[in-house]
Amino acid sequence: MGFEPGSKQLQDGGRNSKGLYHKLLLLLTVIGINVLAFYTFSRSSNSHDKDQGSNSSQQELNQFSLTSNALIVKLSQTKEELKNTQHELQVAREELKLMLDQIGELTRSHLIALQAADRRGLQKQPALSHIPDSAELQALIEPRKLPLGWNPSLNSDSMVAPVGHRCLMQDEDIKKFMDYELGGTCPDDESLAQKLLLAGCEPLPRRRCFAQTPANYSEPYPIPRSFWEGPPDGNIVWTPYECKSFECLNSRAKRKVFADCLDCFDLEGRERHRWLFMSNQLDYTIDEVLELKPGSIRIGLDIGGGTGSFAVRMREHNVTIVTTSLNLGGPFNNFIAQRGVIPIFLTIAQRLPFFDNTLDIVHSMHVLSNWIPEETLEFILLDIDRVLRPGGLFWLDHFFCLRPELNKYVPMIERLGYKKLKWGVGEKLDRGRELQEMYVSAVLEKPIKRP
Ligand SMILES: *[C@@H]1O[C@H](CO)[C@@H](O)[C@H](O)[C@H]1NC(C)=O
Ligand SMILES: *[C@@H]1O[C@H](CO)[C@@H](O)[C@H](O)[C@H]1NC(C)=O
Ligand SMILES: *[C@@H]1O[C@H](CO)[C@@H](O)[C@H](O)[C@H]1NC(C)=O
């Protein structure tokens, strides 16, 4: 069936060329006859002049003339037809040229797009064997054509929105997360978002709904009041937490509930004194660390910085610190922001969102420790090195491990090739000496040049 139109065209084409052939043959015949007629006519005229002619040849001549005229009419008709055919051919040829040009143009742009896609790895996209059945998720991650066409900065003619590849494997959770009323209020699902994040769905997909807002929000306190006075309960969405107030959070420490950073929300407690006083070889003060590089420590990062007290103390020294934190058991991100310093909602597994060789200092306390898989820790340390500027400081604050593990972790830290401006190894005694728990604290300087 599908083949028929093609073969029909072929037949038509054959018929056309056959017709043309016939016309040409006719034309040649007519020309031949005319030449003959002309010849005969001139000959008979001559003979007429000579012998006054004869009745029969005159007749013949008349007859011939008649036939000849008819043929000439036919000839001009054929000529006309031929001219038409030639015109049609010319039109067809021009159309063909136009089509070929268009095909060429299409092929060229297609090739450019393919090359660009290849460079940007778009070609590998079909390797995603499974995309959860969510219209909003698909709407988000679908590459879209740029309204103004090719963009040399993007090196592409389309824009793609990233989501962590693990998002696509959390089938039920991601479908639930992306199920909302378009342009409406988002579900009250902070816990689900964090669960996805911790499962490697990072970055989380964007959504087209309005995030939940606190029930009774009031303007944050001005700096410096905000540094050491926690926000009112009304400024927090409490749904994801067992506690529904700061009073409850602060009482957890006394009730010996297991949670990270148990007493961090109590700004009158231990938080108030951190990094202010030298107590042993593991605790350094912010003053003495900044004194190592007077004036040139201006911006930095605190990884897993609890409620942001390190950033606040550094801010008091005119140093700007961004604090990464999750909301494990409490509203850490909101609290940090309410204090007037910057939180980033980021897991330890995510690549640091800073450019190479940019930060003056990276600090981390109680977070980088032996609970992180060894190879993952190596990736993290090298990422910290990447964002630190040459001569920048890596303040490793209370790295925790067991005594036998020092053989593994100390060389790992030393492999960074940093200068040990401060270095201390000490026993962690709060649970008893027999557990052989150890802390390493260090302030390390990134080399200006690597050999
Ligand atoms: C020519 O032929 C016509 C009729 O065919 C005839 O009437 C006439 O006499 C003929 N003339 C000559 C000169 O033979
Ligand atoms: C709302 O917040 C303000 C300021 O923190 C507080 O005084 C007030 O009692 C709160 N209202 C309710 C209903 O929680
Ligand atoms: C911070 O900067 C302010 C304004 O420049 C200055 O007055 C203050 O002394 C600085 N504080 C410290 C600890 O350097």
Image (cartoon, grey):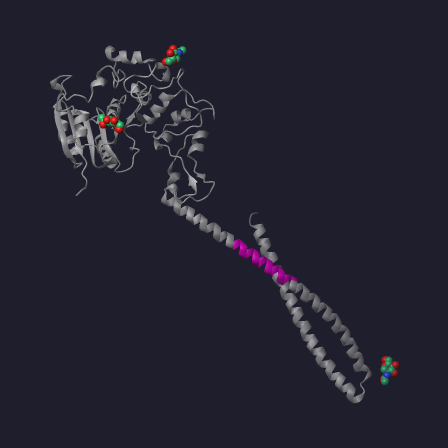
Res. 187 visible in picture: yes
Please give left or right for residue 206 compared with residue 405 in the image. Answer: right
Q: Where does the C terminus fall, quadrant-wise?
A: top left
Occupied quadrant, residue 61: bottom right
Q: Tell me if residue 326 comes above or below residue 104 in the rendering.
A: above
Q: Verify whether residue 190 appears in magenta.
A: no
Please give left or right for residue 292 compared with residue 265 in the image. Answer: left
Front in this rendered view, residue 374 or 292: 292
The span picked out in magenta is 84-100
Front in this rendered view, residue 246 or 312: 312
Occupied quadrant, residue 254: top left
Most extreme residue toward the bottom is 50
Res. 317 visible in picture: no
Occupied quadrant, residue 379: top left
Front in this rendered view, residue 161 or 310: 310
Residue drawn at x 14%, y 33% is 420
In percent of width and height, residue 429 lies at: 13, 18
Q: Tell me if residue 183 comes above or below residue 111 in the rendering.
A: above
In percent of width and height, residue 223 lies at: 31, 21
Please give left or right for residue 68 compared with residue 115 in the image. Answer: right
Please give left or right for residue 1 compared with residue 395 in the image. Answer: right
Assign the magenta stretch its main secondary structure. helix
In percent of width and height, residue 81 lies at: 67, 63
Residue drawn at x 81%, y 87% is 52
Q: How many numbered circles does the render carry?
A: 0
Front in this rendered view, residue 60 or 338: 338
Quadrant for ligand 1?
A: bottom right
In percent of width and height, residue 173 lies at: 38, 25
